Image (tube, helix red, strand yellow):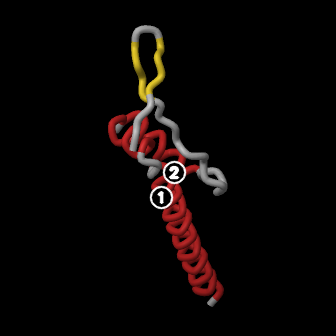
């Protein structure tokens, strides 16, 4: 693998290009929150994940896990409300 460089003023900078972004839907609330957390609190990890193109899949996975957890919590609350309403009417 050969690395090409670009001259910028007196410096030679490597030409680093990321592949095209995935054709997946945009990240949801929790994926964006995790991305923001990594960018502000863990900049080295954020840069490493970004350069290895693992940032988006990680944030997508976290977003899907959060959505699943919220659905589970919502289902439990609904079942709990049904049980309570049946007890009240007895």
Position above or below: 1 against 79: above
Q: Sequence order check: which comes first, mark 1 or mark 2?
A: 2
Q: Do labels 1 and 2 touch, CB within 8 Å? A: no
Tell me the crowding category of disc 1: few under 14, some 14 to 19, or many 20 or more residues within 10 angstroms, Cα based. Answer: many
Would you call the spot at circle 2 few (<14 residues within 10 Å), some (14-19), or many (20 or more)? some
Residue that badge 2 annotates: 56
Query: Is label 1 in a helix, a strand or a loop?
Result: helix
Asked if 9 appears above or below 48 in the picture, the reply is: above
Q: Secondary structure at mark 2?
A: helix
On screen, residue 64 versus residue 58, left or right, reads right
Numbered label tally: 2
At x 58%, y 80%, the residue is: 79
Residue displayed at 60% across by 46% down: 20
Where does the N terminus fall, quadrant-wise? top left
Q: Position of residue 9 (x, y in %)?
A: 46, 9
Q: Nearer the viewer, residue 12 or 52?
A: 12
**Comparing marks 1 and 2, which lies closer to the viewer?**
2
Badge number at residue 51: none
Mark 1–mark 2 Cα distance, whole angstroms, equals 10 Å
Q: Residue at x 55, y 46 (%)?
A: 19
Residue designated by label 1: 62
Of residue 4 and residue 41, the one placed in the foreground of this image is 4
Q: Give how far across and how far down residue 10 sits, in percent.
A: 41, 9
| Quarter assignment of residue 88 | bottom right
Q: Residue 67: percent from the left, percent from the top?
A: 56, 63
Tell me the quarter of the image containing the C terminus.
Answer: bottom right
The residue most toward the front is 2
């Amino acid at each position: 693998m050969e690395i090409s460089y670009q001259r910028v003023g007196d410096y030679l900078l490597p030409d680093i290009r990321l592949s095209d972004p995935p054709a997946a839907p945009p990240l949801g609330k929790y994926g964006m929150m995790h991305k923001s957390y990594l960018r502000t609190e863990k900049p080295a990890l954020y840069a490493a994940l970004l350069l290895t193109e693992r940032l988006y899949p990680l944030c997508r996975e976290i977003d899907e896990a959060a959505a699943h957890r919220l659905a589970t919590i919502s289902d439990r609350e609904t079942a709990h409300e049904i049980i309570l309403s049946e007890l009240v009417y007895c």
